[in-house]
Image: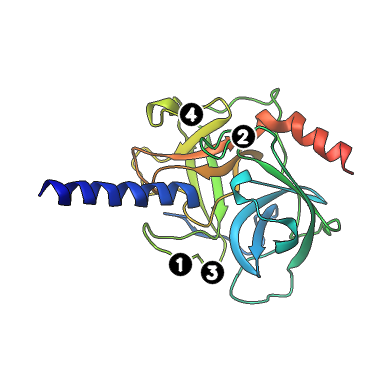
Amino acid sequence: MGHCLQTTILLLLVLTIRDTLEQRIIGGQEVEPYSIKYQASIQHNRNHYCGGTLIAAQWVVSAAHCWRPSSLIQVVLSEHSLASEEGFEQVFDVEKIFVHYNYNYRTFNNDIMLIKLSTPAQLNANVQPAYVPTESDPEMTGSTICTVSGWGVTRIYSYYLSPVLRAVDINIMPNCYYYYWRITDNMICAGSPFGGKDSCQGDSGGPLVCDGRFEGIVSWGIGCANPYFPGVYTRVRNYARWIDWVMNNNS
């Protein structure tokens, strides 16, 4: 009996770690096509595996844990349905990837990377960059409502990505260290105090936008849509200077 209990606990731990590493829309809905103009799909062999955020014509931000060799991935803008070619997609090879120099793959601290596209995107009605906040912008509070978007799974424990872009509104959850012991100042928590709304597998690297500002990157968490374990996001405003430095020195 004791051995079976230990085995069960070990299996649950493995599943939890797997969910945390794959990371992550639960409780949301399909968006109006092309309404989230900064959303990017990062693809390997034309298969979506992570999200990203356009911040300038030739630059996309994603999570460092989404890294793959630049020669093996493409970035797609103006994407809505992953299942069909709709004629509005802009597909780019990747010139170079800049993973944050202090990224820690064990703790997910500094989970951010910059992707330089092979050519600048065509900015139009469907494609526009997101605004990157700085330290001078108003701080977020527990009443701040944000939108997270992506093609991630729509049901807990599912392995099937959403064929269309979806989004859900969630709240900033202060005092993130109440939920996780390894939280740093470079992370923010967001979700619902009742659970049921969250990013999930396939949403990793995607945008969390609050009051029109690109505040977070889908990074990690325990499970999905759990009221006791909100999603954890990389705090983008902490990296505004690093982002500017990389872009200015690699133009």
- 179 sits left or right of 163 in the view: left
Residue nearest the observer in this picture, 237 or 74? 74
Q: Determine the image quadrant of residue 216.
A: top right
Amino acid type shown at disc 1: Tyr
Residue 76 location (% of width, % of height): 71, 62
Cα distance between the residues tagged 3 and 2: 30 Å
Cα distance between the residues tagged 4 and 1: 29 Å
Cα distance between the residues tagged 4 and 2: 11 Å
Q: Nearer the viewer, mark 3 or mark 1?
A: 1
Amino acid type shown at disc 2: Asn
Q: Which mark is residue 186?
A: none
Q: Nearer the viewer, mark 3 or mark 4?
A: 4
Q: Are marks 3 and 4 in contact (CB under 8 Å)?
A: no
Q: Secondary structure at mark 4?
A: loop
Crowding around mark 4 (Cα neighbors within 10 Å: few <14, some 14 to 19, many 20+) is some
Question: Does 241 appear above or below 7?
Answer: above
* Residue receiving disc 4: 183
- 42 sits left or right of 22 in the view: right
* N-terminal-most mark, 4 or 2: 2
* Residue receiving disc 3: 163
Q: Nearer the viewer, mark 2 or mark 1?
A: 2
Q: Which mark is residue 110?
A: 2
Cα distance between the residues tagged 2 and 1: 28 Å
Amino acid type shown at disc 4: Ile
Instruction: Identify the residue shown where x is 60% and y is 70%.
Output: 82
Q: Which mark is residue 160?
A: 1
Q: Secondary structure at mark 2?
A: loop
Q: Are marks 3 and 2 in contact (CB under 8 Å)?
A: no
> Quick check: can you spot residue 63?
no
* N-terminal-most mark, 4 or 1: 1
- 7 sits left or right of 132 in the view: left
Q: Quadrant of the C terminus?
A: top right
